[in-house]
Image: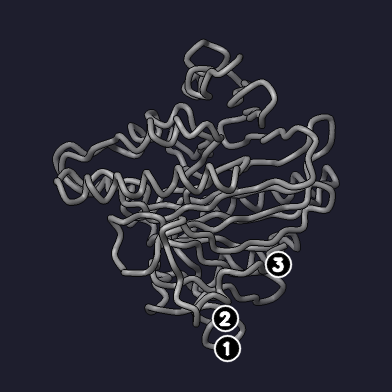
Amino acid sequence: MGAMTRRDFLRAGVATGVSLAMPHFIFAQETHGPKVVRTATDRFELVLPKQPRLRILQIADTHFGTPNPINRLKDKSSYTLIKELVATHKPDYVFHTGDFINNDNENVEWGAIPFMDDLGVPWSVSFGNHDHPNGKKGQKSLEEYYATLNNSVVGYAERSAGARDYCYRVDFRVEGQKPFSSVFAFNTGNPASGMKVNDTQTQWFLNHMDADKSANVQTPVLVMQHIPTIEYKDVFDQKLAVGRQGETVCFEIDKGEIFNQYVNSGRVRAIFCGHDHVNDYIGELKKVKLVYGRCSGYSGYGDWERGARLIEVDTATGRGTSRVVLGKAEKEKPEWRSTLTDSVVS
């Protein structure tokens, strides 16, 4: 394909994410790079060439799209930072853990989607509370929003009466081999369900765990969701975390139901969230790591240095580490450098 971008590759007709009648399709950023295979509306595979590590860049809370001059300038700074982080760390996959676009504002601007498409890396998003519309002029319904993500790795599970849960799964494997790890992504941004993993998404997760058990699949699972669970508060209160708490944990109305299911699965190794812009710690409860991403967007609140979290997973064992990464112009205060270092997450 030469120098074609991933977006060009898609537009050339090799694959399309909006053709939902197709049970199976593939897209790739280039012929020798990662490929994404979709096998169902709620399931994908990221297929890597032979390599020792999968590199995932978690970005969070960019809050793109507010239509005023100040926010447009801030969004440009966020674009510059993300492009720099991708160029520096060369991830195989970028995962945005929500509050991607401020779809709860009037007359939202949607330039962030083609920006992400043009990074040349497969990318996903789990919806946050600001991604959900609230009835103002010029917003998109979640279904319309999803339809614009036709070059991304975002799926949904069918519910009764044609309704959807925007939860999905991505399995990681090396070409010619079985999966070594998976991501399960949940929509925790919906105010109608209390901004947590709702009952139907929970049942979807349990159904996948049951099907995997029947197929003797026991690979490690990483969870991506925007809103932290209540255990993020517990792990810090119990002094079982490393890093900073700059604000009260905003777990909304979560009471621990989904975390118990993660623990009971025996497979969830880590949860990655955003939402709280000035928390960045990692803790562990019941053998599950609770990990905050780093706020990546200058349109978000808080004065912490903007960055991302780099997750590296061994393709042979499924074990991984993560660390906070910053742009070249961002300088963390010396007393907080320990929070940037590698921490085991699976």
Image side of residue 107 versus residue 345, left or right:
left
Give whichever of 322, 135 is nearer the camera.
Answer: 322
Find numbered disc 1 in the image and state the secondary structure of the residue it sits on. loop
Q: Earlier in the sequence, mark 3 or mark 2?
A: 2
Q: Is residue 39 visible?
A: no
Under mark 1, the amino acid is: Gln
Q: Which mark is residue 238?
A: 1
* Helix, strand or loop at mark 3: strand
| Relative to 235, residue 209 above or below | above
What is the spatial separation of the Cα atoms under label 1 and label 2, in whole angstroms?
5 Å
Residue at point 23%, 47% (across, down):
73
Mark 3 neighbour class, 10 Å CA radius: few under 14, some 14 to 19, many 20 or more: some
What is the distance, in whole Å, between disc 1 and disc 3 at their CAs? Answer: 19 Å
Residue 175, position in %: x, y? 79, 31
Q: Percent position (x, y) of residue 152?
A: 49, 33
User: Could you tell me if the residues under marks 1 and 3 are in contact, i.e. CB atoms within 8 Å?
Assistant: no
Q: Identify which residue is drawn at 29% across, 65% down.
A: 301
* Residue position marked by numbered label 2 in the rendering: 235
The residue lying furthest to the front in this view is 329
* Structural crowding at the residue carrying mark 1, measured as other residues with C-alpha within 10 Å and reported as few (<14), some (14–19) or many (≥20): few
- Identity of the residue furthest to the bottom in this view: 238
